[in-house]
Amino acid sequence: MKLSDIHKDCQRKLASAMRETYSDAGSIIDYSFATFYGQGNPKRPRTGTLKGSKKVDPPRISGDTAYLKAGYEGDQISYPDGTFSGAEVLGATMTGTYGVVGNPSYDEEAFRLIIETAKANFASQFGK
């Protein structure tokens, strides 16, 4: 196998691992909302606002370089009654403050799972 063929194969494997991780990251973020909301019910009816914070951008892949951003974005959410901005919603859910009922480690667990999944996806493409 020529060096150029090995290089192309590595680029193909990189792109494949990134696409798999992108798909998996979206599912992990979705699952994190179930983790948060599964903690019980607050005094006020749940609005489901947190689900709107999902932010998983398609991977940017160019030759030997790849980038993926996955997580939560407060700019796209707020409480319908205007009492909390998106940043305040995320802050309250991630710290368990303001009487918010939910599992505040939902985000940390999701990030840990995304990293583990990425490692597994790359290992499956490149070997251990």
Image (tube, rainbow, N blue to C red):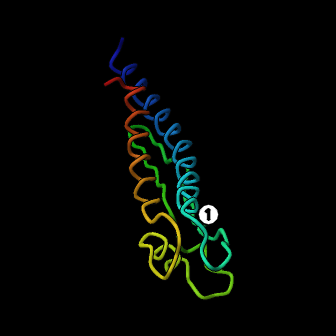
Q: Residues within 10 Å of mark 1 (few under 14, many from 20)?
A: some
Vertical placement of residue 96 versus 121, above or below: below
Q: In terms of image quadrants, where is residue 127?
A: top left
Total number of numbered discs in the rendering:
1
Residue sitting nearer the eye, 4 or 64: 64
Residue plotted at (49% across, 78% down): 87
In the image, is 5 to the left or to the right of 34?
left
Q: Residue 61 in the image: x percent, y percent?
A: 47, 43
Residue plotted at (52% across, 67% down): 102
Residue sitting nearer the eye, 62 or 15: 15
* Residue type pointed to by label 1: Lys
Q: Residue 4 in the image: x percent, y percent?
A: 37, 22
Residue sitting nearer the eye, 92 or 62: 92
Where does label 1 land, which residue? 51
Q: In terms of image quadrants, where is residue 95?
A: bottom left
Q: Residue 37 in the image: x percent, y percent?
A: 58, 62
